[in-house]
Image (cartoon, grey):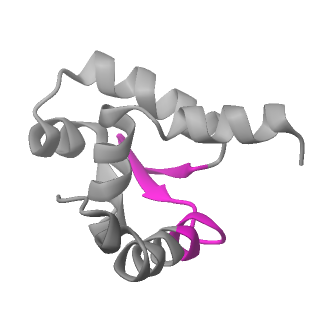
Amino acid sequence: MSFETYHIFFKNLSNTLKIRIVSELRNKDLSVNELADKIGVEQSKLSHALIKLKCCKIVDSRIEGKKRIYSLNKKTIISMLNLIDKHEKEFCKKCGYKR
């Protein structure tokens, strides 16, 4: 991978709204309306963020009736989040970072 590839990927995850989306989708697949209610943000802003996350395949979507249901990319993102959690427990606590 190149610097530009890393930059695009991590830029997608450097936004608070996008991280909140990823956190909610880690727990459960949700529609835009469900995500908007949980996060407390207007649907249009949320949809814009989801488009960016979908473009990079961080999230996937499927149609169920009239709803579009969003989920995390189970092939890569879930295992990456687990690795980040493991890294945080082992290394970041020593730096004094608090949640």
Residue 98: x and y, percent?
A: 18, 59
The magenta stretch spans residue 37: no
Q: Residue at x 65, y 41 (%)?
A: 9
Q: Residue at x 18, y 35 (%)?
A: 36
Left or right relative to 55: residue 44: left
Total number of numbered labels? 0
Foreground residue among 3 and 81? 3
Left or right relative to 99: residue 20: right
Which residues, given as a range, are shown in magenta?
Answer: 58-80
Up the image or down, 65 lies above or below 47; here it is below
The magenta stretch spans residue 79: yes
Foreground residue among 60 and 41? 41
Up the image or down, 87 lies above or below 40; here it is below
Foreground residue among 25 and 65? 25
Up the image or down, 85 lies above or below 12; here it is below
Residue 25: x and y, percent?
A: 34, 58
Residue 38: x and y, percent?
A: 12, 46
Q: Which image quarter: residue 56?
A: top right
Q: Residue at x 39, y 72 (%)?
A: 88
Up the image or down, 5 lies above or below 71; here it is above
Q: Which image quarter: residue 96?
A: bottom left
Foreground residue among 80 and 66? 80
Residue 77: x and y, percent?
A: 56, 64
- Quadrant in which the C terminus is drawn: bottom left
